[in-house]
Image (tube, rainbow, N blue to C red):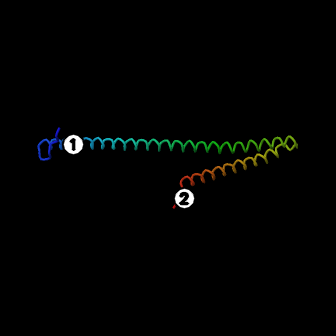
Amino acid sequence: MREPEPGQPNADKAEAGRSGDERELRARLEALKADLSENVREEQAKSAKASSSRESASALATGMRAASELFAGVLVGAGIGYVLDLQFGTKPLMLLIFMMFGMAAGFWNIYRLGTRSSRQTSERNGPKA
C-alpha cells in the first residue's frame, strides 16, 4: 500500500491523528507526573512522622536508663554500706556513707550518658558553619 504524499488530503488526516496521539500521551504523562509527586509527598510525610516517633521513643529510653542508673547506684551503695555495718558493727555510718557514694556514682553515670548523647547528636547533625 502506498503512503499518501504530503500535499494530498489523506496526509493531513494522518498528521492530525498523530498530533492527537501526542496530545493524549502528553496528557497521560502529566497525570502520571502529578500522581508521582503526590505519592512522593505522602511518603515524605510518613517518613517524617516515623522519624519523630523514633526520636520520642529514644528520648524515653534515655530517660528510663538515667533513672535506672541513679536507682542502681543508690541501691548498690546502700547494700555495700549495710553489709559493712553488719561486719564492723557501725550501724548507720557505713550505710549513709556508701549510699552517698552510690548517689555520686549514679549522678556521674547520668552525666556521662548526657554528654555521650549530646556528642552523638552533634556528630549526626554534622559540623555547624
Looking at this view, name the residue that lies furthest to the bottom.
Answer: 129
Question: Splitting the image into 4 quarters, where does residue 126 fall?
Answer: bottom right
Against 41, is 129 above or below? below
Contact (Cβ within 8 Å) of mark 1 with mark 2:
no
Residue with the mark numbered 1? 18
Residue at 50% from the left image edge and 44% from the top image edge: 51
Numbered-mark total: 2
**Disc 2 crowd, CA 10 A, few/some/many (<14, 14-19, 20+):** few
Residue type (three-letter) at the residue carrying disc 2: Pro
Against 129, is 121 above or below? above
Residue with the mark numbered 2? 127
Horizontal side, residue 6 vs residue 80: left or right:
left
Check disc 1 and report its element: helix, strand or loop.
Answer: helix
Is 105 in front, or is 82? Answer: 105
Is 8 in front, or is 89? Answer: 8
**Disc 1 crowd, CA 10 A, few/some/many (<14, 14-19, 20+):** few
Residue at 76% from the left image edge and 42% from the top image edge: 76
- At which x and y percent is residue 48? 47, 44
Question: Splitting the image into 4 quarters, where does residue 67 fall?
Answer: top right
Looking at this view, name the residue that lies furthest to the right.
Answer: 88
Check disc 2 and report its element: helix, strand or loop.
Answer: loop
Residue at 74% from the left image edge and 41% from the top image edge: 75
- At which x and y percent is residue 74? 73, 44
- At which x and y percent is residue 84? 84, 43
Quadrant where the N terminus lies?
Answer: top left
Horizontal side, residue 18 vs residue 80: left or right:
left
Is label 1 or label 2 in front? 1
Residue at 39% from the left image edge and 41% from the top image edge: 39
Res. 107 mark: none
Residue type (three-letter) at the residue carrying disc 1: Arg
